[in-house]
Amino acid sequence: MLSTSALTRGMPQLLRTIPCRAYSELVTATTSPTASTSTSKPGTKQSRPYFVPRNTRGNLPVYTDVRNAGGRHLTLVRNVEGNVAELAKDLSQTLFEKDSYEASKLKIELSQAKHLVISGGRWKNHVAEWLRAKGF
């Protein structure tokens, strides 16, 4: 039987010293340092008073919550940066047409100064698509 030192003797030094990296370290290591952050894109912090950053998996932070044994459906938008009240106002005005049935059922509340709670229906896909269309 060979010992572990005998197995690694023939391997290059580089292969023996590679540290394990987390996902976030890989993402930051692969981003180019030449990318300019001063350019203004739609949906960035410079063009709106609020910003909805994506989560660690790269998805929008829009979640569903079912309460009362399926009798109450909530949509949560979490970790909003900036003016959350302005995001709530924009959502309520532009998510659905003004006199539609959905617009009359839509209720938006602020929670803990960084989160939105949207009730009145199953709006997760509508909210996520609205945020994508805005450039988030």
Image (spheres, rainbow, N blue to C red):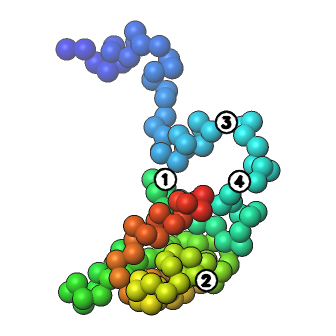
Residue that extends furthest to the top in the rendered view of this protein: 10
Return the residue nearer the eye: 56 or 85.
Answer: 85
Kindly identify which numbered label has been placed on residue 41: 4
Callout 4: helix, strand or loop?
loop
Kindly identify which numbered label has been placed on residue 89: 2
Residue at mark 4 to residue at mark 2: CA–CA distance: 22 Å
Which label's residue is closer to the chain start, 3 or 4?
Answer: 3
- Residue sitting at x 43%, y 69%: 126
Residue at mark 3 to residue at mark 4: CA–CA distance: 18 Å
Q: Is 104 left, or right, of 33 in this rendering?
A: left
Return the residue nearer the eye: 64 or 104.
Answer: 104
Dots 4 and 2: beta carbons under 8 Å? no
Amino acid beneath label 2: Lys
Classify mark 2: residues with Cα within 10 Å, few (<14), some (14-19) or many (20+).
few
Dots 3 and 1: beta carbons under 8 Å? no
Which label's residue is closer to the chain start, 2 or 1?
Answer: 1
- Residue sitting at x 78%, y 49%: 39
Kindly identify which numbered label has been placed on residue 58: 1
Position of residue 123 measured from the top left corner of the image (x, y, whole percent): 39, 75
Callout 2: helix, strand or loop?
helix
Position of residue 46 measured from the top left corner of the image (x, y, whole percent): 76, 63
Callout 3: helix, strand or loop?
loop
Q: Is there any visible trace of residue 87 in the rendered image?
A: yes
Residue 4 falls in image quadrant: top left
Amino acid beneath label 3: Ser
Amino acid beneath label 4: Lys
